[in-house]
Amino acid sequence: MQLSKNKKYQFLFFLILSIYFIFNGGNSNLLIQFNFIFVSLLFLLCLRDKNYQLHLKNFYIKNKLSLIFFLFFLFYLVLQILPLPLNILKILSPEKFNILSSLKSDAYFSSISLSPSNSLFKTLNFFTLLLVILIMNMIFYTEKHRKRFYIFLSISGFYLSFVAVILYLNGNPDILFLKKLYYKDSSTGFFVNRTVFSVFLLFCLISSLEVLKSFNKLKNTNSNNFFLKIYIRLFVVFITIGIITTFSRIGNFLLLFTILTYLLNEFIFRPQNNKSFKIILILIVLIDIFIIGYYFGSEKIVDRFNLLNEEFSNVENSEYNLSRISLIKFSIFYLKDYLIFGYGLGGFENLFKIYYLNDTNFFADHAHSDIIEYMGSLGLIGFLLLISCLVKFFLKIKINYINLNLFSYLLIILIFDFSLQIPIIQILFIIFFILENKISTVPHKSVDRY
């Protein structure tokens, strides 16, 4: 079978995403470099096609101001990591200057960032995100392309949740690059953090449910669609089990919210004659109650949804009595010292080591509140630049149940977690918002070959 042009480029994009899936969501400086190279090469390949150039030009015309703000944002991130003379640093970041003075450093130059190397790779990651936005608007622009991506993510979610549950049932042993340091009693699969994994699976669940809904719109269902429908239903079951067995309260709370929004949409707001889809939604609830109530104990059913209990509990190890709320309060307290120019992306770990009174070797590399960490690391100027890039897009967001779910995920994560620091979660939010709201209209001169 000969693959069409679009399929070739989309499958290459899926291959790159698979690298993120397998290697902890791309959450390391080394992986950020490799993924930047892969995404850049795909972008350059796409630029060779005239139709894709037209799509890119069309996207640029519609979003010129947002792209200009984003370029200013990238320049600002570069400024944070540039070595500056100490007399300039004293003006831009007095607190960083005081730290150097207290250390009696002989350096004549230093950066605004508390961790220049981490900030460099985080900047590289933001450039990768820009390339992902451009690629998405070049090669995904029809309903068929949207469905193709959803099917890919559904298959990926099934595979990763299957592996995660199998590893969990075997005690989460350390295998090759999979080091299970903290979550021996949770499904995390190829990811390190259970909440990040559960958020990833939530995107896979939405994809699977959207594919199932799309079958109801088809007038003629051939044998391929019939079997695909069966497979996707199976995938939904395994993805649901994967989310449940992470035992992440954030993940399970958002799972409950997602199913409720779909049920309300199907039964009340937009009732349709789609019995099989409604049965699947009810089946998810029954699986949830059965697995947790029978296998893990009935008290776990309600306990998993007690969202705030986890946020006020210890981060990783109760031995150190380090709670998430104490990290958030600590982060808020030091916002004032780095108010204008911030302490640099990826600089929270060093901020913690410098200021947090801690008589152990334990440290935190995230504030466990993305909104606070981004405000602190970017400073007021950087944060406003980032908001300026996004405001035009969010003003045009369509009001539907999928966007309601996405905004709910975004709000909960920004307040209570650090999942938005992970590259694959950032990418999935970008992809879903584009697919739901910004699929480009194909210019008249271009030819769409699936």
Image: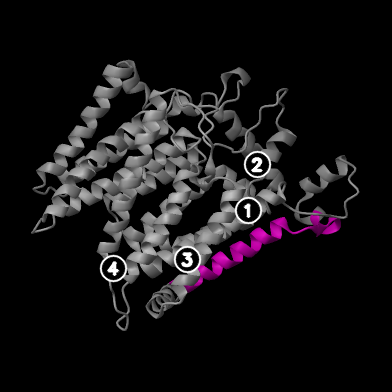
Residue at left 22%, top 44%? 231
* Residue type, numbered disc 3: Leu
Disc 4 marks which residue?
Answer: 2
Residue 440 visible? The answer is no
Nearer the observer: mark 1 or 2; the answer is 1
Nearer the observer: mark 3 or 1; the answer is 3
* Residue type, numbered disc 4: Gln
Image coords of residue 449 (percent x, y)? 28, 73
| Measured Cα–Cα span from mark 3 to mark 1 | 20 Å
* Disc with the residue nearer the chain's start (3 vs 1): 3
* Residue type, numbered disc 1: Phe
Nearer the observer: mark 4 or 2; the answer is 4
| Measured Cα–Cα span from mark 4 to mark 2 | 50 Å
Disc 1 marks which residue?
Answer: 121
Disc 2 marks which residue?
Answer: 348
* Residue type, numbered disc 2: Phe
Other-residue count near label 4 (Cα within 10 Å), few / some / many at <14 / 14–19 / ≥20 = few
Disc 3 vs disc 1: Cβ atoms closer than 8 Å? no
| Measured Cα–Cα span from mark 4 to mark 3 | 20 Å
Disc 3 marks which residue?
Answer: 42
Residue stretch in magenta: 63-89
- Tell me if residue 79 is in the magenta stretch: yes
Other-residue count near label 2 (Cα within 10 Å), few / some / many at <14 / 14–19 / ≥20 = many
* Disc with the residue nearer the chain's start (4 vs 3): 4
Image coords of residue 133 (percent x, y)? 45, 63
At mark 2, the secondary structure is: helix
